Image: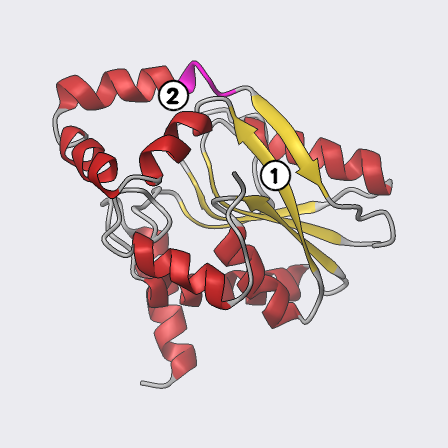
Amino acid sequence: MNRQEQILQVAEKYGSTTDKLFMTIEEAEMLAIELAHRIANSYPDVDCVVGIANGGLMASSIVAQELNVPMEILDIRRRGSYFKRLVYRSERLRAIVARLYRFPLVRFPMYWLMRTMETPIVKECHSVENFDSIAIVDDAVESGKTLAAAVQVIADQSDTNPITAVLCCSREYSTPAIMPDIFMGRRIQHYPWSGNSPQYDEYIKWLKDRGIELSG
């Protein structure tokens, strides 16, 4: 099986599964490459990729490389992401939270708590006013509020209507604030950048090797 066949096989796997799987670094790379191919096929004039920190950093970096265009980073967070960052910084806390998520009596209240803190806050945005066709890339859309806020920021700054591309558009919200123009699947996974992923430390190394820093 050649590389392109492997990429298509991984895209089919995560495009059709209803299971929540632990995705490997290599699989995440392949999905991002296929995402880039789909962007190029549908929007060949894209001249800049904007990655949403932190979940979209890996995918946007690969997409920009595949499209041979510059990448800018938009640091836009939900209020609940502060809690996530505190957890991710401690290997012990990550392990505890991962165990707790196995129990519905704990998992569902935590989901509820995070969703009460979904208001996006723009922390930093590099200038994109000199680009004509911009693709915003993130890992996943749930409520769509973060992606909708990102579109508004970029549209205000560049006077363009950016396209949006994500690895997953969750089915959990029947009417998200925005539907991405391109998405790969409908089931959010345990990505390498998820705090409970066994590949999280490898993901951090992947970013450092490419000179990409996590936002604080």
Which one is nearer the viewer's eye here, 64 or 148?
A: 64
* Residue shown at 29% from the left, 39% from the top: 90
In the image, is 59 to the left or to the right of 12?
A: right
Identify the mark at residue 114; answer none if there is no mark.
2
- Residue 135 position in % (x across, y down): 68, 52
User: Looking at the rendered structure, which numbered label has been put on residue 5?
Assistant: none
| Coordinates of residue 132 in the picture (x, y in percent) | 84, 54
The overriding secondary structure of the stretch rendered in magenta is loop
Check disc 2: other Cα within 10 Å, few if <14, some if 14-19, many if 20+: some
Report the side of 76 relative to 72 (left or right). Answer: left
Q: Residue at x 46, y 17 (%)?
A: 117
Q: Residues within 10 Å of mark 1 (few under 14, many from 20)?
A: many
For the residues bearing labels 2 and 1, Cβ distance under 8 angstroms? no
- How many numbered discs? 2
The quadrant holding residue 199 is bottom left
Residue extending furthest toward the bottom:
2
User: Which of the two marks, 2 or 1, is nearer to us in this view?
Assistant: 1
Point out residue 82 in the picture as x, y percentages from the top left corner: 45, 27
Instruction: Say what amino acid the circle numbered 1 marks.
Output: Asp
Asked if residue 67 lies in the magenta stretch, the reply is: no
In three-dimensional space, the C-alpha distance between marks 2 and 1, rounded to whole angstroms, equals 18 Å
Q: Is residue 96 left or right of residue 115?
A: left
Which type of secondary structure does the marked residue at label 2 adopt?
Answer: helix
- Name the residue rendered at 23%, 53% in the picture: 198
The N terminus appears in which quarter of the rendering? bottom left
From the top left corner, tell me how far across and down residue 24 is, in percent.
Answer: 29, 61
The answer to which of marks 2 and 1 sits earlier in the sequence is 1
Closer to the camera in the image, 111 or 124: 124
* Residue at point 38%, 78% (across, down): 5
5 or 150, nearer to the observer: 150
Q: Which residue is mark 1?
A: 75
- Range drawn in magenta: 114-118
